[in-house]
Structures are given as structure tokens and as C-alpha cells.
Amino acid sequence: MNIDTARARLRPVSVVDIDELVHLDSDPEVMRYVSGGTATPRAAIEDWMLPRAETERRRHGTGTWVLCDPATSAFLGWISLRTPRHSSRAELELSYRLRRTVWGRGLATEAALALVGFAFDHLRTERVFASTVVSNESSRRVMEKLGMTLAAIHLYDDDTAQPQELLTEDPDRDRCEVEYEILRADWQARSLRWSSPGGLTA
């Protein structure tokens, strides 16, 4: 299904998007916090990303959506909700990746708000979470704007530093990953505040 926001249309990803996906993942700045700037091979997109997205869509109603300009249909990036492979909890993982030309416009937050709302309104999930490396402050700001809170800090290797210290003091902050979450009850309370007189509007 398509999901419309004020400035974007979200539609399920398909094979027609392969060239745009390859181009997106060929930008070193886009991939800086994903792979250290290394491009994603075309084969990985064709043989892994797209089939997994289609399987998610058919089985769970989740998957990957392409962000498009509603006026021109131009490709802006993608956003996804995925079922974690090794979890028995009723939870979904949120991810997003946008073209550098549209960074700083709030589109990631706008699309993520729509998709998290879809998850809690239409899917049987009690928790939506997202992860990134500590130094990816832009992505962390998106998570915080969604109402997510810090749930966990995962170290990539054995280290004597305390995890909380890595958020502010350690010079190599790519050594650990932060996980943010929002629970159904928190989302519903937040949505109620938005709809109340004087509250925020989504």
C-alpha cells in the first residue's frame, strides 16, 4: 500500500527502483555510517534487499517503501519496517536512507512518523526500534523527534569504557551502536497530545 505525507509519497519498493537504489548506496556520504563509505554491490540489492522486502510485504505487511516526490515521482530515498529475524517479541525495526540532496529538510522524520503510525495503527507490534552508530547525530535526532528514547548501547568489541561514557567522551564513537525505541503505549500517549487543543500536529 502507498502512504502519503505532506511532502512525499511512500510506495513499496520494486525492481524498477534498482538503479536508484544502487546510485543512492554509491554515495560515500550516504554510506558513511552504514559501511564506512563503501558502496553496496548491485547484486546485494538485487539478490538480497529486494527479495527480503517482498517477503516482508507478503508475510507481514511490512518491508521497504521508496520515498518519492508526489509532484514529479522523483526518487528521494527509502524507509523500512522489518521483522527482526531472531526475536520472539512483537517488535519492528525502523530504518531509513535518503539522498544527500534532500538532507536537512525533515523528510526522514516526516516519513518515519507516517510509518511508525502505520505500524501501531495497522500491525500487531508493541515496539518499534531503530539503531545507528553513536556519532550519527542526524539519525539520532530523527529517532528522538519520533518520541523514541534510548533503550540500549551495544559495544562492537570488548572495551573497558563504560557504555554511557561512549555517548559523550570517547573520541572514537563509531565503536558502539545506540538503539532507540518507542512502545505502543508511548506512541498512543504522544498521538493524544498531538490531537489535543494546543498540541502538536503531525
Image: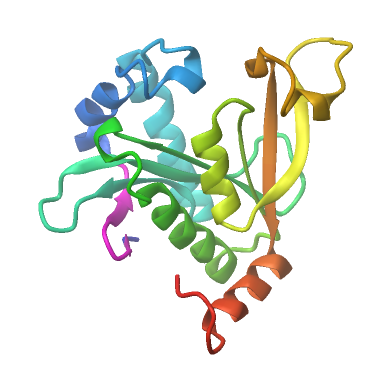
Q: Residue at 64% across / 27% down in the picture?
A: 134
Magenta span contains residue 8: yes
Image coordinates of residue 193 in percent, x first then y, are 61, 79
Question: On the image, which quarter does residue 145 sit in?
Answer: bottom right
Q: Quadrant of residue 90?
A: bottom right
Q: Quadrant of the C terminus?
A: bottom left
Nearest the eye: 72 or 202: 202
Q: Name the one closer to the observer, 17 or 130.
A: 130
Question: Compared to 189, does 168 lie above or below?
Answer: above
Q: Quadrant of residue 199?
A: bottom right
Q: Is residue 10 above or below residue 95?
A: below
161 vs 73, left or right, is right
Report the residue that reaches farthest toward the bottom. 197
How many numbered discs, if any? 0
Q: How is the image coloured?
A: rainbow
Q: Position of residue 5 (x, y in %)?
A: 32, 64
Q: Is residue 69 magenta?
A: no
Q: Is residue 48 above or below residue 113?
A: above
Relative to 18, is 180 on the left or the right? right
* Depth order, front residue of 22/108: 108
Give, as a single range, the part of the protein colored magenta.
Answer: 3-13
Residue at x-position 55% and y-position 34%: 137
Task: Name the residue at the left extreme.
Answer: 72
Q: Quadrant of the N terminus?
A: bottom left
Image location (x, y in percent) of residue 144: 60, 50
Image x and y of residue 98, in percent: 34, 37
Identified at 32% across, 48% down, the residue is 105
